[in-house]
């Protein structure tokens, strides 16, 4: 084989020796200027595939690959670059384009100016416009949420959205309404996921109701309201259920009631304990006295009133956590600071 250009014998590439082939075929036709959009709110860069929150070097590599096509007959081209800032929105790039054809490689050096165009990504535009699709409502079952519950729910929802790292997942606004909270969310899927997580974390029931909002590209668009009702009781509550006095020791996934008189625990579905009534009670660590008569009493730490404690402790303990009610004093399996939030 010989080169049709210079007549040299040896391997040829499309009839040319390697030297003439490389001379006649540049790897790319570099432009003088390239533009790339960057969101001025979240810093995301826009590519052909959409907005993504990546660092600038990755965005520039993608820009070179998308905006500068390889020239024929090169089969594959890769880019490396070094960027130098001219000002906040202009860069000078020194680029190497490495082209491959069969067993040949060619490196082409060039410079290109990159202009960063401030813009707003789709997600930030929606956030500024307070756009929402899903609504998450959090209420108590037959009661108002406590201030501590409101803080805890806000914290969980905000942390969950931040942890997702998805620019399309955001909270448009939060409204404190009578008895609870309303979260306006970017997608229905986000609302449903948060409802499940809240129910698992705090205990309660979940329901949803879709409402036709409009049409988008010929398809019906629904806004889904997800309702979470947190359980009627909290861990540490003392309740009267079917004539028995009990303390709530768990609220998820079932409500567990421990009979204060017998110490027996039973679990119920939340709907099965809605008839239970909360009872005023104190829980504290009390001094336990074993009288000569054999009776065991608990002593109130403030009034020093002594009451028989039920069920009596099995050992000769001198201190124990008790529940103090009008019905009497009872041993508790919970710590004295058990949450009543």
Image: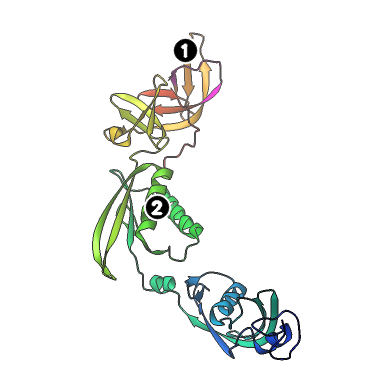
Q: Where does residue 95 sit, x and y in percent of width and height?
A: 66, 82
Is 72 left, or right, of 266 in this rendering?
right
Q: Residue at x 41, y 43 (%)?
A: 200
In the rendered view, tell whether residue 157 sits above or below residue 302: below
Can see residue 141?
Answer: yes
Report helix, strand or loop for mark 2: helix
Tag of residue 193: 2
- Residue located beneath label 1 in the image: 295
Magenta segment: does it hold 37?
no
Provide the residue span drawn in magenta: 307-320
Q: Look at discs 1 and 2 and give the one toward the viewer.
A: 2
Instruction: Pick the residue in front: 242 or 222.
Output: 222
Q: Where does residue 153 sit, x and y in percent of width and height?
A: 42, 51
Circle nearer the N terminus (1, 2): 2
Instruction: Pick the residue in front: 335 or 29.
Output: 29
Q: CA distance from mark 1 to mark 2?
A: 54 Å
Q: Where does residue 281 sit, x and y in percent of width and height?
A: 39, 32
Residue closest to the far top: 293
Instruction: Pick the residue in front: 200 or 177.
Output: 200
Report helix, strand or loop for mark 1: loop
In the rendered view, tell whether residue 100 sits above or below residue 236: below
Instruction: Pick the residue in front: 263 or 331.
Output: 263
Q: Quadrant of residue 70?
A: bottom right
In the rendered view, tell whether residue 37 sits above or below residue 146: below
Residue closest to the far right: 9
The quadrant of the rendering that contains the C terminus is top left
């Amino acid at each position: 084989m010989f080169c049709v250009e210079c007549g040299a014998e040896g391997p040829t590439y499309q009839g040319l020796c390697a030297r003439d082939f490389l001379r006649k075929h540049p790897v790319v036709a570099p432009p003088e200027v390239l533009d790339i959009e960057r969101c001025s709110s979240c810093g995301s860069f826009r590519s052909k595939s959409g907005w993504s929150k990546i660092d600038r070097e990755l965005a520039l590599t993608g820009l070179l690959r998308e905006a500068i096509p390889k020239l024929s007959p090169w089969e594959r081209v890769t880019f490396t670059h070094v960027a130098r800032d001219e000002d906040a929105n202009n860069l000078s790039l020194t680029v190497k384009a490495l082209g491959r054809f069969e067993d040949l490689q060619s490196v082409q050096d060039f410079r290109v100016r990159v202009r960063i165009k401030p813009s707003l990504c789709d997600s930030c535009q929606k956030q500024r416009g307070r756009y929402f699709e899903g609504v998450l409502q959090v209420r108590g079952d037959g009661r108002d949420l406590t201030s501590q519950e409101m803080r805890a729910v806000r914290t969980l929802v905000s942390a969950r959205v931040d942890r997702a790292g998805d620019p399309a997942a955001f909270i448009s606004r939060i409204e404190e309404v009578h008895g609870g909270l309303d979260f306006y969310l970017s997608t229905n899927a986000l609302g449903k996921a948060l409802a499940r997580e809240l129910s698992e974390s705090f205990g309660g029931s979940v329901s949803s109701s879709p409402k036709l909002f409009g049409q988008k590209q010929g398809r019906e668009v629904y806004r889904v309201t997800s309702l979470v009702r947190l359980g009627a009781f909290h861990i540490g509550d003392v309740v009267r259920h079917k004539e028995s006095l009990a303390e709530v020791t768990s609220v998820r996934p079932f409500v567990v009631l421990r009979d204060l008189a017998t110490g027996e625990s039973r679990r119920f579905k939340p709907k099965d304990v809605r008839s239970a009534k909360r009872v005023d009670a104190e829980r504290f660590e009390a001094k336990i006295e074993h009288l000569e008569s054999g009776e065991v009493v608990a002593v109130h730490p403030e009034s020093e009133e002594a009451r028989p404690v039920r069920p009596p402790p099995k050992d000769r303990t001198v201190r124990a956590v008790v529940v103090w009610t009008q019905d009497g004093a009872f041993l508790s399996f919970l710590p004295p600071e058990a949450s009543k939030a």
